[in-house]
Image (cartoon, grey):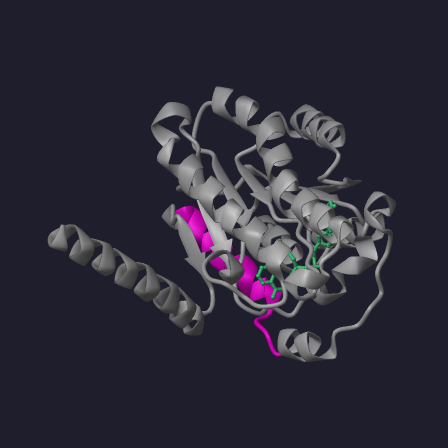
């Protein structure tokens, strides 16, 4: 995308952390911003911050798991702004348990928000974005946990791999719909992600206020989410598919792909022996 000023960005989970960072970065470039967040007060406070510096921003309560609510959110955004140029499917949650301890409700919650939430966003926005003239772009927030395995967060890893796959496919399909796509794969960022149980819906067990001091201290040393927002903005301008914010996470990619390459070498050797 060559020019952002005057265009429209939609950000789910825009009330906190990385979504807030993206909302500010896009607003600072003159974009109009629509936030959908399950925490109305959080979305509202980011709206007030952006309007306080002269930006144009709306914020609505939105649960990305609720497909009809996402459709209504899209209707409201198109009604208010007339177009959507950058769609950021960013809302996400995490649980911390080993595989044998994860409950049905844990799986359903994380799959619901991190995967179905992205699908709902794509279904609600893509057809109208496709019909629109000019450049348009999707940013899906995955994680470095979408690039390689991470112990203790299997549902999160599963959904983030899925988001990487969806994003790569959307990008490959661009000749058919003209919509660009980036997938954001950060390492640790200073946000409220470790306390994401605060927003757990009653249908999947209700709020979970367990604390996780070890992860919390790692996240507390993470990157400033405002910096992540600026990196995402530049990646949209540069039309990058993968957005890596933490160079040191390369070793996670290298380890996974070295193992895959070794398995192919073994397959080649087997085929050679046959
Ligand atoms: N913080 C990190 O270290 C990190 C690293 C990699 C990826 N991520 C990803 O970044 C994204 C943003 O998370 P964050 O770290 O900024 O956390 P955060 O908790 O600070 O922000 C997440 C926002 O999403 C909202 N949200 C939660 N459930 C929702 C739902 N059902 N519908 C709508 N909104 C909902 C929350 O209210 C919150 O405002 C997530 O997808 C997360 O997986 C975070």
Instruction: State left or right for residue 20 relative to residue 136.
Output: right
Q: Quadrant of residue 225?
A: bottom right
Question: Is residue 219 positioned above or below 268 on the image?
Answer: below
Instruction: State left or right for residue 262 relative to residue 240.
Output: left
Q: Residue at x 50, y 51 (%)?
A: 161
Q: In front: 232, or 255?
A: 255
Q: Residue at x 81, y 47 (%)?
A: 204
Answer yes or no: is residue 51 visible: no
First to last magenta residue range: 221-237
Question: Is residue 83 positioned above or below 185 on the image?
Answer: above
Instruction: State left or right for residue 22 relative to residue 48.
Output: left
Q: Position of residue 258 (x, y in %)?
A: 31, 65
Question: Is residue 264 positioned above or below 223 on the image?
Answer: above
Residue furthest to the top in view is 131
Question: Is residue 232 positioned above or below 216 on the image?
Answer: above
Quadrant position of ligand 1: bottom right
Q: Position of residue 98 (x, y in %)?
A: 66, 66
Answer yes or no: is residue 140 visible: yes
Q: In front: 6, or 176?
A: 176
Q: Magenta includes 230?
A: yes
Q: Position of residue 39 (x, y in %)?
A: 81, 50
| Majority SS type along the magenta span | helix
């Amino acid at each position: 995308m060559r020019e952002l000023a005057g265009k429209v960005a939609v950000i789910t989970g825009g009330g906190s952390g990385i979504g807030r960072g993206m909302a500010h970065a896009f607003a600072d470039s003159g974009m109009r911003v629509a936030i959908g967040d399950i925490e109305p007060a959080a979305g509202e406070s980011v709206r007030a911050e952006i309007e306080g510096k002269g930006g144009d921003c709306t914020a609505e309560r939105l649960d990305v798991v609720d497909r009809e609510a996402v459709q209504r959110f899209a209707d409201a955004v198109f009604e208010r702004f007339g177009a959507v140029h950058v769609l950021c499917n960013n809302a996400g949650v995490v649980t911390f348990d080993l595989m044998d301890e994860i409950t049905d409700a844990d799986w359903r919650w994380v799959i619901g928000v991190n995967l179905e939430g992205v699908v709902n966003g794509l279904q609600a926005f893509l057809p109208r974005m496709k019909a629109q003239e000019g450049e348009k772009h999707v940013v899906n927030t995955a994680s470095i946990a979408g690039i390689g395995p991470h112990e203790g967060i299997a549902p999160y890893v599963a959904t983030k791999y899925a988001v990487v796959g969806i994003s790569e496919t959307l990008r490959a399909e661009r000749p058919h719909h003209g919509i660009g796509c980036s997938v954001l794969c950060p390492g640790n960022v200073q946000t409220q992600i470790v306390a994401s149980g605060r927003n757990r819906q009653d249908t999947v067990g209700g709020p979970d206020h367990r604390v996780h001091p070890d992860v919390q201290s790692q996240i507390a040393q993470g990157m400033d989410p405002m910096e992540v927002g600026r990196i995402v903005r530049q990646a949209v301008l540069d039309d990058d598919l993968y957005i890596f914010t933490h160079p040191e996470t390369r070793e996670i990619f290298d380890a996974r792909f070295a193992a895959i390459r070794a398995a192919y070498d073994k397959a080649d050797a087997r085929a050679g022996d046959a």
